[in-house]
Amino acid sequence: MLSIREAGAGVADWRRRPGRNRVTCKMGSNEESTPREELAALTAQARRDLARIAHPAMPWLEPRLGPHGKPAFDVLILGAGQSGLGIVFALQRAQVKNVLAIDKAPYGREGPWSSYARMRTLRSPKDYTGPDLDVPSLTYQAWHEARFGLESWTALQSIPTPLWASYLLWVRETTAVPVRNGCEALDIAPAVDDLIAVTVRNDDGSRETLHARKLVLATGQEGMGRWWMPEFVASLPNRCRAHAADAIDFDALAGKVVAVLGAGASALDNAAVALEHGAAEVHAFCRRPVPQLVQPYRWLTFAGFLRHLSDLDDAWRWRFMRTIMGLREGFPQETWDRCACHGNFHLHTGAPWLSARTLGERVEVETPQGPFVADFLICGTGVDIDFAHRPELRGFAANIATWADRYTPAPDLRDDRLARFPYLGRDFELLEKVPGTTPWIGNIHVFAIASTMSFGPSGSSINAMTTAVRKLVDGLTRGLFKGDLERHWRSLLAYDVPQAVLRAPSRTVGEFPSAGK
Ligand SMILES: Cc1cc2nc3c(=O)[nH]c(=O)nc-3n(C[C@H](O)[C@H](O)[C@H](O)COP(=O)(O)OP(=O)(O)OC[C@H]3O[C@@H](n4cnc5c(N)ncnc54)[C@H](O)[C@@H]3O)c2cc1C
């Protein structure tokens, strides 16, 4: 287990160790004191709490069979990051238990937390709840206090990223979420009886087809597209460029000049790690005259917006989300400080990259302020929606309705990037571009950043989990219930379970004392 010190906590008093992405902290009780006992007690408490709120606990689904008599899942979730876990947990609480989450990553490597999330601490405030789905004993705070004590929680400024990853694994274990790791979805297609067939590759290389009534894509930020960088950078050799979400050999950047495109949180995290690995110079290039300092995701974190943005008409949803997504994601103070404490860090504003070319082993980017020569380029440029780029979506990518298909904003509100987002139905389901061509995609639900234009923050955001997961799961259970209406009706008519037994009374049944007696 990691101690909070090893995790690199963003706590009251931290100092960088030269050349290392590590901090030390002074905050009283920052090591686990009696972690195993405390954590075991919390786990037991959480399970007791869940048992107490299990109502309505009656099973209500009957297993379906796929081809060759193989059982089909009621819901199959692609992705076992925090969203996938939260969705399965919520489904289980709705007594939808014939479910599975699959993840191509090995156990403990799901999501960005132990790979390309290069910040020391989460960017969101420590008190945002999420995967707990409002069960107090499942919150990060409860877990942190059990492991490190109340004093540690009180002193903590932000949640150390590795601890968030450990916490997610604890939630998964405590709530008994079934996950198959090392299992990648390769293809999605329609199957018999309104089922969906998902071809997967298991970690032993074997291929298999899983069937499900409903599918959820909880495949992360790039789940309906790809990490994006300008084409003129993408076409450079791999040795001189990377995306911020790539695995990067930072040790190899020691003594090198690194140019980072973007000045958002991930761009600056990568700049900081390069600096800490001894890069000679790191230059971040921001196209705006002033970097994005306001974090719109803070503004929108109130119940009204999180719950009801999706109730608004297209014009309002577009207006809000275009403004928010247009601002992009600002960086927190710690991220800036982590870069700015290095004298060899430079921020260039009003400096988009216009083109790039190799110069021997080096690379030259063109900016409005003139050319700049670097040894390595890192693009902190986010994602682009591109259904056809994802192998599992390719078979029906052309018929997924987008915002461009359904809504035309006024010319001054146009945004081609956002117009590529899927236009989702009420239950986060895919809609068809041409109705009737692939009607089965209505059983595919999207819970990722791609859901954002339709629902506001939902997938890919901790702040929205407690509201959005519930909304999605309501949609899933709605579909499962409606899909079984005939069976439920027959079941009601056949229902003959007596609630009481007429035991032999002291007087004969049917003989009541008359009123006059
Ligand atoms: C660098 C970074 C930092 C962030 N920091 C914060 C933060 O501090 N606070 C905050 O609120 N939000 C943050 N976010 C946003 C959001 O919380 C994260 O993106 C979070 O990981 C979203 O969870 P998720 O489960 O939706 O997706 P992910 O955690 O990305 O999980 C998706 C999973 O799907 C799996 N997968 C993908 N394709 C397939 C396939 N075909 N078959 C099987 N499995 C597949 C992946 O392996 C992955 O494990 C951050 C995002 C990034 C990228």
Image: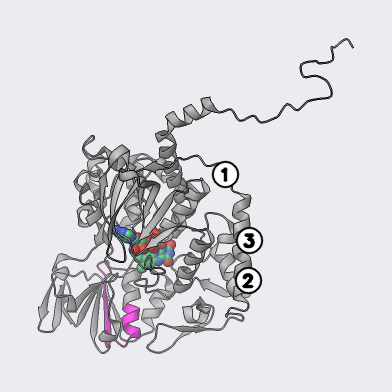
Q: Is residue 115 left or right of residue 308?
A: left
Circle 3 crowding by C-alpha within 10 Å: few under 14, some 14–19, many from 20: some
Q: Position of residue 302 (x, y in %)?
A: 49, 52
The magenta stretch is: 271-291
- Residue at the farthest top position: 516
* Secondary structure of the residue carrying numbered label 3: helix
Mark positioned earlier in the residue sequence (1 or 2)? 2
Q: Position of residue 56 (x, y in %)?
A: 57, 42
Q: Residue at x 55, y 28 (%)?
A: 495
Mark positioned earlier in the residue sequence (2 or 3)? 2
Q: Quadrant of residue 365?
A: bottom left
Q: Is residue 130 left or right of residue 339?
A: right
**Amino acid type, mark 3:** Gln
Closest to the camera, between mark 3 and mark 1, is: 1
* Secondary structure of the residue carrying numbered label 1: loop
Q: Residue at x 59, y 48 (%)?
A: 54
The answer to the question of whether label 3 and label 1 lie on touching residues, with beta carbons closer than 8 A, is no
- In the foreground, 402 or 428: 428
Q: Is residue 89 left or right of residue 250?
A: right
Kindly identify which numbered label has been placed on residue 38.
2
**Residue 293 visible in the picture:** no
Residue 319 part of the magenta segment: no
Residue 287 part of the magenta segment: yes
Q: CA distance from mark 3 to mark 1?
A: 19 Å
Mark positioned earlier in the residue sequence (3 or 1)? 3
Residue topped by disc 1: 57
Residue topped by disc 3: 45
- In the foreground, 353 or 452: 452
**Amino acid type, mark 2:** Glu
Q: Position of residue 467 (x, y in %)?
A: 48, 50
**Amino acid type, mark 1:** Ala
Q: Position of residue 102 (x, y in %)?
A: 37, 58
